[in-house]
């Protein structure tokens, strides 16, 4: 069975590119543009990995990460934080994220970080 990944990023192009890359790696990927949509989605299915952008129109990826890690039903799910702002590379200290992805990202680096969590 394919491992599933949820992506929360408000930029459609980024969601589409990441979805294409990870689908080609045999992952089942679902993208969300808003925190609100993400919260609805995670009520119905729990992914094996979550990739969160920091800056979102209706919230903050670090806050979402904190919520996920504080909730017993989701705290086991690995989280990768993604941002164009290098200041957030210390996100690991802000929430219990497993890793950080810089934007723009290197495709091989993205795949490696995802595989490190899921394989």
Image (spheres, helix red, strand yellow):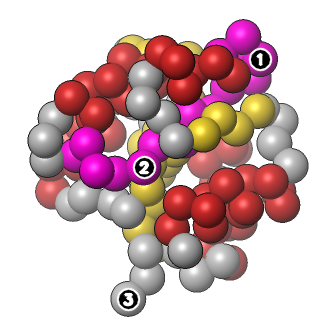
The CA distance from mark 1 to mark 3 is 35 Å
Q: Is residue 12 visible?
A: no
- Which residue in the protein does label 2 denote? 78
The CA distance from mark 2 to mark 1 is 21 Å
- Which residue in the protein does label 3 denote? 1
Q: Is residue 77 visible?
A: yes
The CA distance from mark 3 to mark 2 is 18 Å
- Which residue in the protein does label 1 denote? 86
Q: Which residue is rendered at x = 75% and y = 23% of the image?
A: 84
Q: SS at mark 1?
A: helix
Foreground residue among 36 and 112: 112
Q: Which residue is rendered at x = 67% and y = 55% of the image?
A: 113
Image x and y of residue 86, in percent: 77, 17
Image x and y of residue 49, in percent: 43, 56
- Quadrant where the C terminus sits is bottom right
Q: SS at mark 3?
A: loop
């Amino acid at each position: 069975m394919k491992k599933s990944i949820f992506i929360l990023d408000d930029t459609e192009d980024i969601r589409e590119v990441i979805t294409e890359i990870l689908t080609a790696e045999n992952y089942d990927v679902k993208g969300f543009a808003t925190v609100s949509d993400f919260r609805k989605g995670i009520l119905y299915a729990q992914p094996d990995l979550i990739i969160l952008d920091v800056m979102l129109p209706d919230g903050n990826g670090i806050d979402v990460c904190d919520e996920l890690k504080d909730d017993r039903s989701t705290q086991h799910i690995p989280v990768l934080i993604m941002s164009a702002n290098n200041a957030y590379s210390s996100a690991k200290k802000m929430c219990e994220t497993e890793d950080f992805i810089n934007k723009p990202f290197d495709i091989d680096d993205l795949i490696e970080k995802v595989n490190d969590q899921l394989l």
